[in-house]
Image: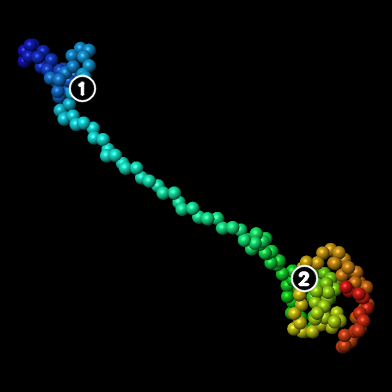
Amino acid sequence: MSYQKSLLVAALVSGFIAGGCAANKRIEGNEVPLEPQTNDVNMPPQAAPPVPPVEVAAPPEVPTPEPTPEAQAPPPPEPTPNPCHDYIVVKGDTLWGISGSSNGYNDYFLWPLIFKANRDQITDPDLIYPKQDFCIRQDFDDKDKQKARKDASDTPKYVPHTKPRETLPVDYF
């Protein structure tokens, strides 16, 4: 290959590299193209079709009911929990024994509280019977417990009897 041919090939190659495939559309000097140089057909941009306005209806007005006397009344009180648990008497039970057990108060001297809470079933604290259903109340305050301990201490020693006493030795109430 001759020197001139090699210069020509070099010029073509450099023009191809500088201008890409479209070497004939090369920009010379400081020229700035006014439009992009492409082979694509310029199509005008299409505007989106107009969206018709949507009317939003207001929600219908709901009349506010007039407050009734029932609606203004305070809510009923919540039921209070049962202040006692049941204990069914079995043969051999005594108020002293029930009171001292874990089903009672874990304190033998609080037996007058069981007597007081079940006065409708017990006429004499010495005489209780199997199948009686006692309420073991848990809502006694400290004052009631102190009085019960004192009454239990003041109660005379048990004397066997089969009929209820007309007068109890201590005022348990």
Which residue is found at the position 74% from the left and 83% from the top?
131
Work out whether 100 lies above or below 128: above
Work out whether 45 lies above or below 21: below
Within the image, what quadrant is residue 85 found in? bottom right
Which residue is found at the position 88% from the left and 68% from the top?
147
Residue at far left of view = 1
Q: Position of residue 48 (x, y in %)?
A: 27, 38
Within the image, what quadrant is residue 97 found in? bottom right
Instruction: In the rendered structure, find residue 35 and report the number of the disc placed on it.
Output: 1
**Tally of numbered discs:** 2
Work out whether 38 lies above or below 86: above
Q: Is residue 108 visible?
A: no
Kind of residue at disc 2:
Arg
Would you name the residue on which mark 2 appears? Answer: 137
The answer to which of 19 and 10 lies nearer the viewer is: 19
> In the structure shown, which secondary structural element does the residue marked by tag 2 occupy?
strand
Q: Position of residue 160 (x, y in %)?
A: 89, 85
The answer to which of 167 and 22 lies nearer the viewer is: 167
Within the image, what quadrant is residue 116 found in? bottom right
Q: Earlier in the sequence, mark 2 or mark 1?
A: 1
Q: Position of residue 127 (x, y in %)?
A: 84, 83
Q: Nearer the viewer, mark 2 or mark 1?
A: 1
Work out whether 60 lies above or below 89: above
Kind of residue at disc 1:
Glu
Quadrant of the drawing holding the C terminus: bottom right
Instruction: In the rendered structure, find residue 10 and report the number of the disc placed on it.
Output: none
The answer to which of 54 and 123 lies nearer the viewer is: 54
Which residue is found at the position 12% from the left and 17% from the top?
12
Which residue is found at the position 14% from the left and 23% from the top?
22
Q: Position of residue 121 (x, y in %)?
A: 80, 81
